Structures are given as structure tokens and as C-alpha cells.
Amino acid sequence: MAISDETIQQAEARMTEIRRTGAAVSARYDKHAGRIVIALDTGVELAFPPHLAEGLGNASADDLAEIELSPSGLGLHWPRLDADLYVPALLQGLFGSKTWMAAQLGAAGGKTRSAAKTAAAQENGRKGGRPRKVTA
């Protein structure tokens, strides 16, 4: 399947538009702060703790320190971890795939304490607590 010149020009135009929001010119792991620091060509620096990003949470400092930038500046790659992040997504607050992000939000939601949740737990406690499982 041949790719037309028009298709190539359209793809280049899309990438140029995406790069206007900021492309990475450098990335490093700041061991003292415990953060990944990304410098963008706009002059903005983005820093975040590794546990917020898919594939970086349990990595060692040495593994986090080895970061490769894509030629376009739109991607980051950790070869030792086989982890990749998309810079425009990071700027939108997306630190992983939809499935991974949903799991993180679900886990956070399960830990949330609200007045209604507390009241329900107290009422359940007054009734003798959670029913015991019956084993056959």
C-alpha cells in the first residue's frame, strides 16, 4: 500500500499542530525530589512523581533515570521498564492508558470517606457488623 504525498503532508500538519502545545526537549529523573522532570520547548517544565504514571510506579531510581525522547519530542521511553508516555497526554493530566487510569480512579474512589459511607458503616456495626460467610 503506497502512501500518497497528500497523506504525508496531512500527517506532518497534524504533528506540527500537536507540537504547538509543547514538545519535550529534555527529561530527567530528579532523585532528590523523587520526580520526573520534563522541559518543553515552550519554556514550561512539567514535574510529577513516578507513581502517578503507568509503568513507573515500582521502578528503581536507576531505571527511572534512563529516559529516551522521541525525535518529535512528543514521546518519552524508559527502555529498562519498557514504558512509554505521550507528552501531550501528560499535559492534559493523562498518565496512562484508559484502563490503567480507570483502575487508579476506582482505587481512589474506594478509599474515599464520606458522611454517608461513615453513617452506613456505623449502622451496620450496630446491627452486628458484616454477616459472616457461610462455608459449605
Image (cartoon, rainbow, N blue to C red):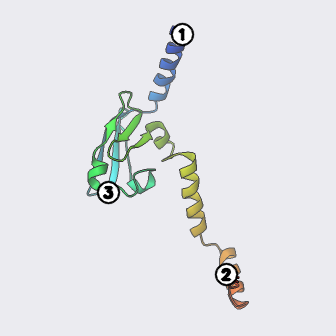
Is residue 24 shown above or below 16? below
Cα separation, mark 1 vs mark 3, equals 45 Å
Q: Which residue is at 46% across, 32% downward?
A: 21
Which residue in the rendered view is the most extreme toward the top?
5
Q: Which of marks 1 and 3 is nearer the N terminus?
A: 1
Is residue 107 shown above or below 64? below
Q: What residue type is labelled 3?
A: Gly
Residue 43 visible in the displayed image: yes
Nearer the observer: mark 1 or 3; the answer is 1
Q: In which quadrant is the C terminus drawn? A: bottom right
Q: Where is residue 30 in the image (x, y as percent from the top left)?
A: 28, 52
Is residue 34 shown above or below 92? below
Q: Where is residue 43 in the image (x, y as percent from the top left)?
A: 35, 36
Q: Which mark is residue 121?
A: 2
Q: Which of marks 2 and 3 is nearer the N terminus?
A: 3
- Please tell me in which quadrant of the rendered image residue 61 appears: bottom left
Q: Residue 6 carries which label?
A: 1
Which residue in the rendered view is the most extreme toward the front?
136
Circles 1 and 3 in contact, beta carbons < 8 Å: no
Q: Circle 3: is it few (<14), some (14-19), or many (20+) Cα within 10 Å?
A: some
Q: In this view, does 130 lie to the left or right of 15?
A: right
